[in-house]
Amino acid sequence: MDKFLIQGGKPLEGRVTISGAKNAALPAMAASLLTDQRIVLRNVPRVRDIGTMRSLLDELGVDSAVKHEEHGNRVEIRARKLINPVAPYELVKQMRASVLVLGPLVARFGHARVSLPGGCAIGARPINLHLKGLERFGASIRIDHGYVEARADGLNGAPFTFDTISVTGTENLMMAAVLAEGETILENAAREPEVEDLANLLNKMGAKIEGAGSDRIRIQGVSKLHEAQHVIIPDRIEAGTFLAAAGITRGHLKLDHVEPAHLTAIIAKLAETGLKVTPGDAGELEVYGPDSLRSADVITHEYPGFATDMQAQYMALMTQAQGSAVITETIFENRFLHALELLRMGADITVDGRRAVVRGPTPLSGAMVQASDLRASASLVLAGLSAEGETLIDRVYHIDRGYERIEEKLRHVGASIRRISET
């Protein structure tokens, strides 16, 4: 397994280009199943999860090709036919977003067999709302040997209210509804920018979707979709991670290819801690890390609130802030695993259920630590950048799932970080 070796204590200075959002690219790739014509996606990040989705589409019999461009990859996908309507456990266990093929497969081909995702390090992430929605649209659902078996002789639009907000649930049902007969209204829908980006792609393909980005999405079903080209939105979590990196190293960074409107809650919270974040030219942010950080409490919420995917990075930042910060995690019940590794580096953190108290500033010292999930690995990188001495982070395949060449981007702005590959 690859590792990162970081020599801490160096302020970050320079310019970073933010990649496309993998959480927008993945449902966009799944949406290609809804038509037999070509879908072209640009600004697709070069991350591990994209490769997993390509492998899944290949398993289904979908043609895809990748071309490197200046900003991200250009991915061309064409689902002319379906060889095998099965999303196997071997792929779904690597990436829970694989379940996003369920809605498109049922909508276009009338049959899908998708492995249940199983356990997850950060907490329970059931897909019951996906299944309830598809049943509401007329699909028959059964669970067989760990797989969801879904069949439908055509779907019918219907109103559906989510019991709890679900991003992938909203995306799955939105994709299913675009080919359903009649009107669908999704209530208590996820409002994330990635949901709105998917709706924009689907509308380019000929769908009729209104209200994406709000909690009420109206979809008028159509009989067929067609080819389209689409540019994936910037990754707001990668941008937030680099903002925090500037703060924890007392650095100065300029971020290119960002969408500041997607970062409102993150920027507001970081400003409370003393970071100065200002918009520059179109698609640019400039951030200055202060000499002294201030503690500030945070509660994670669904968008437009403070993203749970930024909670781990914020915790690392708070280890260097003056005072006590209370971090409350409302989305996942087991998303403080990184706290145990930060303690090994000298942090003062007390965890009680979904609440963590971080007292600072505490000098961090380099140590051998282990990543438990994607965002936890990012928090350990931030801690390593701030720590005295060497930090060795194991299991960095987690960070490769969602950050494009993060060690190269960090080196470009002055970090001492290198990848150690082991066979």
Image (cartoon, helix red, strand yellow):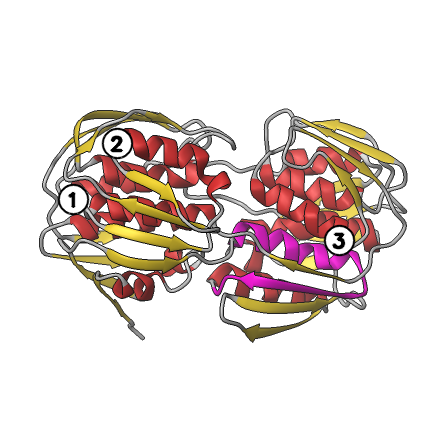
Point out residue 58 in the picture as x, y percentages from the top left corner.
Answer: 66, 69
- Is 397 above or below relative to 24? below
* Left or right for 191, reference 335: right
Q: Disc 3 designates what residue?
A: 204
- Is 376 above or below relative to 391? above
Mark 1 and mark 3: span between their CA atoms? 50 Å
Q: Nearer the viewer, mark 1 or mark 3?
A: 3
Q: Residues within 10 Å of mark 3 (few under 14, many from 20)?
A: some
Q: Are marks 2 and 3 in contact (CB under 8 Å)?
A: no
- In depth, the one of 96 and 287 nearer the eye is 287
Q: Quadrant of residue 364?
A: top left
* Left or right for 388, reference 78: left
Q: Earlier in the sequence, mark 1 or mark 2?
A: 2
Residue for point 39% across, 48% down: 285
Residue for point 43% across, 27% down: 330
Mark 2 and mark 3: span between their CA atoms? 41 Å
* Helix, strand or loop under label 2: loop
Task: Report if residue 216 lies within the magenta region.
Answer: no
Mark 1 and mark 2: span between their CA atoms? 24 Å
- In depth, the one of 198 and 384 nearer the eye is 198
Point out residue 192 in the picture as x, y percentages from the top left corner.
Answer: 57, 38
Amino acid on which the number 3 mark rests in the picture:
Lys
Amino acid on which the number 2 mark rests in the picture:
Thr
- Magenta segment: 22-46
Say the numbered circle drawn on residue 273. 2
Residue 395 seen in the current view: no
Q: Disc 1 designates what residue?
A: 344
Q: Nearer the viewer, mark 1 or mark 2?
A: 2
